[in-house]
Image (spheres, rainbow, N blue to C red):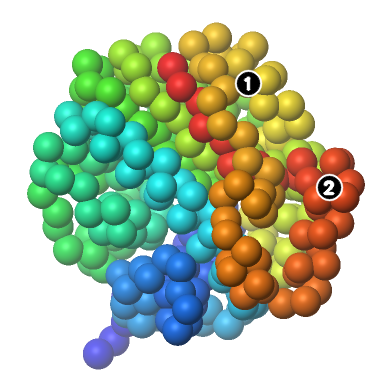
Amino acid sequence: MTGEKVSLTKEKETLLITLSAKAGESRMPDSLLKDRFAAEAVSRIDYDFSRLNVDRDMMIGVAMRAHTLDGWTREFIARHPDASVLHLGCGLDSRVFRIDPPPTIQWFEVDYCEVIALRRKLYPERESCSLIGSSVIDRHWLADVPADRPTIIVAEGLFPYLAEDEVPRLLRRLTAHLARGEVVFDGYSRLGLALISWQPSVRATGARLRWAMDDPRGLERQVPRLKLQTELLAYDPRAYDSKQIERLSWAARLTIGLFAALPALGKIGRLLRYRF
């Protein structure tokens, strides 16, 4: 069977990095994510994934990040059975299938029209899951999202690719529209962005990273409704048990040790949860 053709470039093409990583980790016998939908999607796409150079350590690291964001989303849904989930820059992530929310949850997947069209070909339709084809920074799509339900906004691997002024502006618009909820995402310092930019996978796409976060409290000043609730540093032991770290190569474990010893390195990447 002929696979689905993919003609994404630059920032849009980076969604294939995370898809490849989650699919690869899910094929491992000791998988944390167990994302069969990602693995099946990769097998159905006509694309040379080898050019992205996604290695085992990246697979495990991306799975650990996704697992934490999935956990925060599950916690929110458990507290708010009438919630909405707003998945920004969803790409080809199969989070809605991993979490498998009850039909009382309204789930919204938002990404560029060509990405949403590809999602429709690769993933089955799901009750109470709406697909919105739009740039996340466009003003019009938010009208389709109810304002009166508690809402968790999930943005994995998205904000660093937006312009510096676009992230706070987007978050101000979202928090002005929505009554209450949380925002969960990954953020990186300027040093973190520089290091990510040199990763072979990112360089292969030609994508440009723009938005850095050196101080999570700074976002509270830019978006007054946001209040920082949880901050986890890269490979924070509070988020992962030792078995996950042990899965990584010795070189990766050595790097994590340096992160723990040197605060400037430890803060290059964070997983963040804000409430509003």
Give above or below for 5 relative to 234.
below
Q: How far apart are labels 1 and 2 at the CA level?
A: 20 Å
**Looking at the rendering, which quadrant does residue 182 occupy?**
top left
User: Viewed as shown, does residue 153 lie left or right of 1?
Assistant: right
| Residue 230 visible within the image | yes
Residue 173 screen position, x and y as percent: 43, 17
Farthest-out residue, bottom:
1
Give above or below for 232 relative to 117.
above
Q: Quadrant of the N terminus?
A: bottom left
| Residue 41 visible within the image | no
Name the residue located 46 percent from the left edge and 55 percent from the top edge. Answer: 67
Other residues around mark 1 within 10 Å, as few (<14) / some (14–19) / many (≥20): some
Dot in front, 1 or 2: 2
Residue 112 screen position, x and y as percent: 38, 47
Name the residue located 46 percent from the left edge and 22 percent from the top edge. Answer: 275
Q: Earlier in the sequence, mark 1 or mark 2?
A: 1
Q: Which residue is mark 2?
A: 265
Say what amino acid the circle numbered 1 marks: Leu
Taking depth in this image into account, of 72 and 57 the one nearest to the observer is 72
Residue 7 screen position, x and y as percent: 45, 67
Name the residue located 57 percent from the left edge and 56 percent from the top edge. Answer: 240
User: Viewed as shown, does residue 76 lie left or right of 80?
Assistant: right
Residue 4 screen position, x and y as percent: 32, 75
Other residues around mark 2 within 10 Å, as few (<14) / some (14–19) / many (≥20): some
Name the residue located 42 percent from the left edge and 41 percent from the top edge. Answer: 72
Say what amino acid the circle numbered 2 marks: Leu
Taking depth in this image into account, of 212 and 75 the one nearest to the observer is 75
Q: Which residue is mark 1?
A: 219
Give above or below for 235 relative to 171.
below
Q: Quadrant of the C terminus?
A: top left
Q: Could you say whether the residue bearing mark 1 is in a helix, strand or loop?
A: helix
